[in-house]
Structures are given as C-alpha cells and as structure tokens.
Image: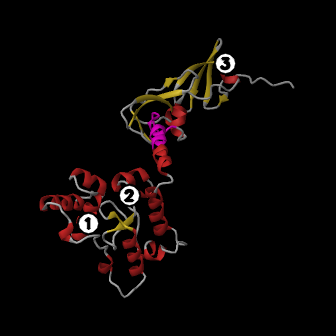
Amino acid sequence: METTKRVINISGKFGSWTVLEKQGKQVLCKCDCGIQKLVYSHTLTNGRSTNCGCKKRKESIPVGANFGRLTVISDVEVKGKRGELLLLTLCRCGTQKYVSKNSLKRGLTQSCGCLQRDSLKTDKTIHGHCKSHEYNSWLHIKRICYNKNHHQYKYHGGCGIEVDASWRDNFTQFLKDMGLAPEGTVISRIDQESDFAPGNCLWIPRKEHYRQIHLLRRKEFLISQILPKPVVTNSEINVSPNIVRAIIKDHANGEANMNKLATQYKISTQDAINIILHHV
C-alpha cells in the first residue's frame, strides 16, 4: 500500500507546531505555547515531533509529591537504560532511589522495595500463626463486630462495639499488644461498653467468658455486672503492693500484654490477669 508523505509548507501545522521557515534539513517552527525551535523535517512528517515539550512539562511531577511511601525530592528527569524518565525519590525508610515517572503516576511503585519486604515479614508472621488460638481470636472479634450474620453480632457490633483501628487489619500489632494466650483462656474486654482495643482487652479463663455471654443475653443485667471475676481472691495473690500499683498504672497507660507485664515484674501471667480483674 502506498503512503502519502506529508509536504512541509510555510504556515503548515504539525501538532502544536506551525512552520515558519525551512532551513535545509531543519525547519523553524513555533509552538502554540509561543516557543520557537529548529526541528528536523523528518520528525515532523513522521509525527515524532508535535510540540516543544510543553505538554510533557505540564505533566511534570512537583517536588514533594507523595506516592505511597515515596516522596519526590527532585524534578530533574533522568533517562533510564530503556529510555524511560526517572525521578529521584526518598522512601519513608530513608532510602533514595530513582523511580520511573510513569510508574509513579500509574501507582505501580509505592516504595523503594521495603513495602514488599515488610509485607513478606507480615505474611510470614501471620502464616506462622494462622492455626493458632491468637489468630483465630483476632478473626473472631472481627466477625462478631462486623459480620451481621454472626449469631453474636447483636451483642457486639450490633451494640456499637468495634475493633480498634490499630488491630482491625493488623494481626501483628494485635499479637504484639495481647501477647500469647495462656492455656485455657479467651480474649475478653474489661469495660464491656468499650471496644476491643489495647488496654481494654486481656486473656481470661474460658468459663468466665461463657459466663459473660450468658449475662449479655439476660437484658435485666447491667453492663457493670458483666465484668469478669478474678480466678482467685485478693488475699491469694502473693504480689507486693508496689508491683500491683505499677501493673495497674502500666495497664491504665495502655499496656494490654499480660505476658509482657508478667515478665517485666517477674510474676505469673495469671497473677497479672487477676491483679487487673481485682482493680477494674
């Protein structure tokens, strides 16, 4: 098939270019934005040159623009090995890296690579606990708060109870705050009117949990009557008053990890749980 070659005439239009004057193999053109420039004739006729570059400049990414964990720290565009335009960015982790401008604009690149590494670490953490009691407990509290079809929803999510934002989509943080569950325990809230959140949750004996569920279903009971009871009496907790006060203070400041408190003050996890239950 025979193609018709475009003829370059004075005042002819090639994209945003207007031909002003022919100068051998080059042509003096004026862009719609007002810039004049010498352009090779063949780049006009084959369509490779249609403007002075002003359209590309309009699409430039300003310094300070954020893309996920990346922040653009230079608007100087550098050509990569494949001819792509690169911009220097600073990742939240502190790494500087040249990233494809196109990848940034399309949302394909969100970090220097640390995001993927962190995701792999999280996946490994979850995978290592996917069959654990702690992981199933995390899933359970989300179900009873957000799954309207769950038989316990009306006692939790239906009453406005939620899972704290720091836990909702982050099992690693939940595990860090709660610690490993002592044998025979389940997660419970100290203040039954508040959310599943750091500082308001602890592991309690399973039979106490069943008692709470039973009381929740009896509407004549007040919320204040549903708080879990200690496993032993106050006199049976062989812990110094100073340690008791310190544990209560730490818990009031948001420390929900009973294992961590027990290790810190060199007492058993069950004693730490009982101290909290005696003084709520």
Tag 2 secondary structure: loop
Mark 2 touching mark 3, by CB under 8 A? Answer: no
Q: How many marks?
A: 3
Instruction: Give the image location of residue 248, x and y in percent.
Output: 20, 62
Q: Main secondary structure of the magenta part?
A: helix
Q: Is residue 112 magenta?
A: yes
Please determine whether, in this image, residue 166 is positioned above or below residue 151.
above
Quadrant where the image shows the N terminus: top right
Instruction: Give the image location of residue 131, x and y in percent.
Output: 51, 54
Q: Which residue in the protein does label 1 denote?
A: 274
* Colour treatment of the image: secondary structure
- Residue furthest out toward the top: 24
Rate crowding at label 1 as few (under 14), some (14 to 19) or many (20 or more) other CA atoms within 10 Å. many
Label 1, label 3: how far apart the Cα atoms are? 87 Å
Q: Do we see residue 78 in this rendering?
A: yes
Mark 1 touching mark 3, by CB under 8 A? Answer: no
Q: Which residue in the protein does label 3 denote?
A: 41
- Residue furthest out toward the bottom: 220
Nearer to us in this view, 178 or 116: 178
Q: Amino acid at mark 2?
A: Ala
Q: Do we see residue 33 in this rendering?
A: no
Q: Earlier in the sequence, mark 1 or mark 2?
A: 2
Tag 3 secondary structure: helix
Q: Quadrant of residue 166?
A: bottom left
Question: From which residue to which does the magenta span run?
Answer: 109-121
